[in-house]
Amino acid sequence: MKHAFFVLIFMTSLAQAFNVRKSKDRLLLRETNCEEGQEIVSSLAQWNLLAKTGKQCDTSAPGEIKKNYCQFDITDCVPDHVVKYQGATPQTDGPNCWNLSLVMSKILPALRYSSPEEMNFYMRPPLCRQLKDGEEKIAGDVGAIRQVKKDKTPEYHGFIYISEKVAYSKNGFSRMAPYDLQSLDNVYEVYQVPRQEECRKNEITEGATCDKAVAFFRCQSMDEYLENNSNIPEKIKETFQKVGMFEVCVEDRALRGNAISKEATKNILDTSKALLNYLKQAKDSPEVAKLDKEERDFVIGSLQMRLEAISEQLAMFGGTQDGTSLVSGLALEGFAKQIKSASKGVAGVQK
């Protein structure tokens, strides 16, 4: 699957009328048609508003007319992530489409490799719900392109929907694939989603004849979930915070090439070990007994998925710079598997 995504970024893209580029600290959108450019700016402004960035986008500002195009300053019309990373490429392989979708949905805190299993795990309750066919999509919804097989629909690509004309996507896990505002049609073309209506609905229906189809989801953030669920033990919430801190170090390594400190590596390994020991003793813990099965499976499953994905990203670093990536990656993978096993043995948490 990874090799497939590597190839896809070199496929010929649809010719799209607009493009987005950086000029110093400003983000500029160019469109051959001023009216269509204004429409794109309005859809970006809606995304900016729903993302609660606090920035004010002037959608009435006319585009600057150049020789062959209209130019719009969209710096204040998009989330800061786009201003920072539009057109940027990581220093290493790993950060990919699924991770971008989860980060922009505020489910994950940092840019890194995400597995298809991690993407699929989150595209369901309690964080995400699938939109019904006919339900109106809004800017910020997640698009999940999936392969359509007889008895399953495995993940193939993920992106952020902005409008029927615009999406935010990283087309591949390769270091050569940039974060990019692009046309929605371009995403569909690159990932070979047929134009038939049944392939581009909100839901992938049983019996669909598409090889690839898209489904759409609306999500709440991980912080919202943890804050609104008082039953979740503080020890588990602390583990989420510590894993998140390490993921920020992983992002710094992946995007900027900075080494992960030995202290940070030791902290995440110690945190994983402490979580494993906690789960082994959880059957005697009254606070864990408050969790129902769905809550337990989600919070422990989330931590397990994150550790496994982080371990894969560390392995991609190869240990060439910080010297510990391969070893710590294997250790984290082992902890993740043990945590999964230990969580199944937790007693007293069934409904």
Image (cartoon, helix red, strand yellow):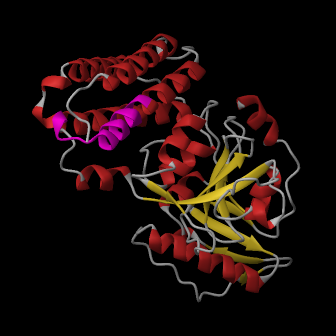
Q: Which residues are magenta?
A: 288-304
Residue drawn at 48 percent across, 17 percent down? 329
121 lies above or below 269: below
Residue drawn at 40 percent across, 34 percent down? 301
Q: Position of residue 186 (x, y in %)?
A: 79, 59
Given residues 115 and 28, the one toward you in this image is 115
Magenta region's main secondary structure?
Answer: helix
Residue drawn at 63 percent across, 69 percent down? 133
Horizontal side of 306 relative to 37 (left or right) equals: left
Given residues 99 and 79, the one toward you in this image is 99
Horizontal side of 164 relative to 90 (left or right) equals: right
Residue 265, picture quadrant: top left
- Residue 295 in the magenta stretch? The answer is yes
Horizontal side of 269 relative to 76 (left or right) equals: left
Inspect this view and state whether residue 326 appears.
Answer: yes
- Residue 345 in the magenta stretch? The answer is no
